[in-house]
Image: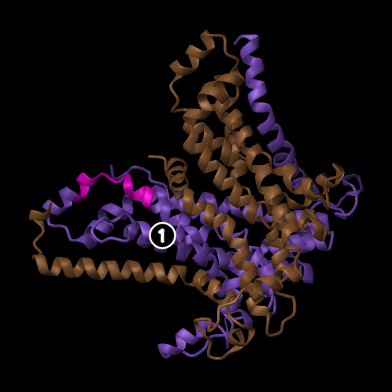
């Protein structure tokens, strides 16, 4: 390849340097809002109010974080968020594995149209079903309660789709051999199939966890203002309207920092699985 | 098919299918049914009374119901068009930067871009409401450094919707960049080698090879971007409450306000049905315009 390029050594190095600078500049610009968020959470109220804005906190302190804990019941909100995210994630992984296995490895009447209907729900914006769903969970006695947040979200089409894509790649021989040995279908699924699609399970775990940790519209609707049951994202939304005085900016930034941490930390450790699964489900040859 | 197989098929499918049927498909059908009724969301479904197309007539009519709905519909259309128009070219440009191996930094860029996609929208809204602050915010300060006068951002009806588009693009572009990279990896390297032999410039290669072969990726991205765009809710609910002067009142916010907060369940359902039908039209249009019909191969 390099022999075909007419550029001499010097301009090539120059071009590489310029492109690297462009990439770095974009990365810095993209990271800027989050960097500003963390810096601002460490400023004093006076610094937050200054015009023109101060970039670097003169005496970094965690007062804003203590203040947030005074406005919002942080412990309770974090527990609520963790409950919502963990329960939905575990359930979604299990239900998706089961249905994904059936769609990938069983032959039955109506399989393709059933799959098509389920996949279509993936493209349905939640607002379209919000109003009757709210009444439905009301009938089930789940409104104003964390269970109301969780129960409608124990299965989803994306999970089924992702699992089917990966389970299709598990060799039939492996499954047939276990059947000959008399293993039950559930045993085969959880002892043989699931361990061979661990990357998909990791990806789905992270997608589901982040999605439900971050979700706002449905919890806000179904919890009907029951602040005891609020997840962290709803609790923090109250910071913006709280005490519009000098402390407000620091409060908001400290609150936002707290809400961002769990999903972003999870992502940094496991981003490879996210990226692979997007490639597997997003693009069809 | 033996009895055992039938039983295990049902057993495997029942939990996911049952849950999706009860909590997605049934509400979907109910939304359509309720759109022809007058019904208070605070009461049982049995209190809904059939009113034919009256709700839809209201949405098209001259009263404030129709005016507010059409404003929300228009805002959502503008918001969606702007989001897609920004996200698609950006995702290809950033995708090329992540995908190339000529200069270092691609993986760093991908990590930064994709980590913003993990940030809860509520935190994005909180942070950007402060970044946009006309006097204490850093954005106007930086604009000042290059001689651009301070902008009104979220506080003026002229700029508020665009400001929300920008924060949303910032949050989402990482996901679409990863999609673009996935598309780029599928393009055979041999095509570029052949083009190089023919003396095609990098510019020509982009327009003649890269872009045409990204067509399916871009179609998928466009569909997802449209569906994401109509869901915008948090920045509006949190910062602008639909204002100033209704300029950021978008569909998800409006439908929830009418159907849940004002408990006008029938009217809200009619709005939801209209939104869904419009989405179907847009997606069908995208497919007709962008689908690779294979005529060039």
Residue placed at 61% from the left, 14% from the top?
B5
Magenta part of the chain: B181-192
Q: Position of residue B186 (x, y in %)?
A: 32, 44
Is-magenta flag for residue B189? yes
Q: Which residue is mark 1?
A: B91
Callout 1: helix, strand or loop? helix
Chain A visual colour: brown
Q: Position of residue B109 (x, y in %)?
A: 38, 61
Q: Nearer the viewer, residue A284 or B179?
A: B179
Residue drawn 20% across and 68% down?
A15
Quarter occupied by the C terminus of chain A: top left
* Front-lying residue, B116 or A105: B116
Label the purple chain with its letter.
B
- Name which quarter of the figure residue A155 lies in: top right
Q: Nearer the viewer, residue B93 or A181?
A: A181
Tell me where residue A129 appears, x and y as whole percent: 72, 49
The dominant secondary structure in magenta is helix
- Picture layout, residue B50 above or below residue A109: below
Foreground residue, B159 or A41? A41
Residue A206 visible, this orientation: yes
Residue at horizontal 63%, vertical 56%?
A214
x and y percentages locating residue A252 in the rendered image: 65, 73
Q: How many marks?
A: 1
Is B42 on the left or on the right of A221, as rendered?
A: right
């Amino acid at each position: 390849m390099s022999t075909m390029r007419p550029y001499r050594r010097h301009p090539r190095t120059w071009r590489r340097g310029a492109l690297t600078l462009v990439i770095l500049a974009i990365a810095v610009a993209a990271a800027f809002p989050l960097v500003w968020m963390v810096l601002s959470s460490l400023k004093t109220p006076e610094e937050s109010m200054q015009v023109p804005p101060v970039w670097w906190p003169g005496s970094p302190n965690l007062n804003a974080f203590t203040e947030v804990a005074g406005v919002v019941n942080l412990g309770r909100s974090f527990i609520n968020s963790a409950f919502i995210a963990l329960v939905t994630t575990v359930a979604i992984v299990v239900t998706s594995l089961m249905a994904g296995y059936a769609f990938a490895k069983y032959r039955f009447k109506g399989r393709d149209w059933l799959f098509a209907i389920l996949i279509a729900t993936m493209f349905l914006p939640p607002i379209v079903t919000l109003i009757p769903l709210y009444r439905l969970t009301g009938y089930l006695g789940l409104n104003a309660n964390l269970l109301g947040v969780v129960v409608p979200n124990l299965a989803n089409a994306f999970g089924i789709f992702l699992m089917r894509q990966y389970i299709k790649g598990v060799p039939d021989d492996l499954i047939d051999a276990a059947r000959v040995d008399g293993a039950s279908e559930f045993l085969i699924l959880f002892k043989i199939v699931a361990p061979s699609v661990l990357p998909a399970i990791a990806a789905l775990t992270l997608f589901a966890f982040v999605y439900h940790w971050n979700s706002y519209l449905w919890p806000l609707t179904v919890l009907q203002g029951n602040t005891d049951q609020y997840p962290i994202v709803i609790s923090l939304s109250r910071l913006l309207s709280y005490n519009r005085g000098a402390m407000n900016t620091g409060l908001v930034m400290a609150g936002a920092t707290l809400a961002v941490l769990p999903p972003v930390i999870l992502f940094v450790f496991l981003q490879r699985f996210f990226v692979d699964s997007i490639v597997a489900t997003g693009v069809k040859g | 098919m033996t009895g055992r197989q039938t039983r295990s098929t049902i057993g495997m499918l029942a939990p996911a299918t049952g849950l999706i049927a009860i909590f997605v498909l049934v509400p979907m059908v109910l939304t359509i049914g309720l759109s022809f009724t007058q019904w208070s969301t605070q009461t049982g479904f049995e209190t809904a009374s059939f009113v034919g197309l009256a709700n839809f007539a209201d949405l098209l009519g001259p009263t404030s119901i129709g005016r507010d709905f059409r404003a929300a519909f228009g805002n959502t259309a503008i918001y969606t068009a702007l989001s897609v128009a920004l996200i698609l070219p950006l995702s290809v440009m950033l995708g090329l930067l992540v995908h190339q191996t000529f200069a270092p930094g691609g993986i760093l860029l991908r990590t930064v871009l994709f980590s913003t996609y993990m940030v809860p929208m509520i935190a994005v809204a909180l942070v950007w409401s402060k970044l946009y602050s006309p006097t204490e915010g850093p954005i106007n300060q930086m604009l000042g450094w290059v001689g651009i006068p301070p902008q009104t951002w979220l506080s003026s009806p002229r700029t508020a919707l665009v400001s929300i588009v920008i924060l949303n693009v910032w949050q989402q572009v990482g996901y679409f960049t990863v999609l673009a990279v996935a598309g780029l990896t599928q393009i055979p390297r041999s095509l570029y080698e052949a083009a190089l032999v023919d003396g095609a410039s990098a510019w020509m290669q982009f327009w003649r090879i890269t872009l045409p072969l990204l067509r399916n990726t871009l179609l998928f991205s466009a569909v997802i971007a449209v569906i994401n765009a109509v869901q915008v809710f948090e920045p509006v609910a949190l910062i602008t409450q639909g204002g100033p002067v209704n300029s950021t009142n978008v569909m998800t916010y409006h439908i929830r306000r009418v159907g849940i907060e004002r408990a006008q369940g029938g009217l809200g359902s009619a709005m939801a049905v209209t939104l869904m039908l419009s989405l179907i039209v847009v997606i069908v249009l995208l497919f007709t315009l962008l689908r690779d019909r294979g005529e060039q191969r």
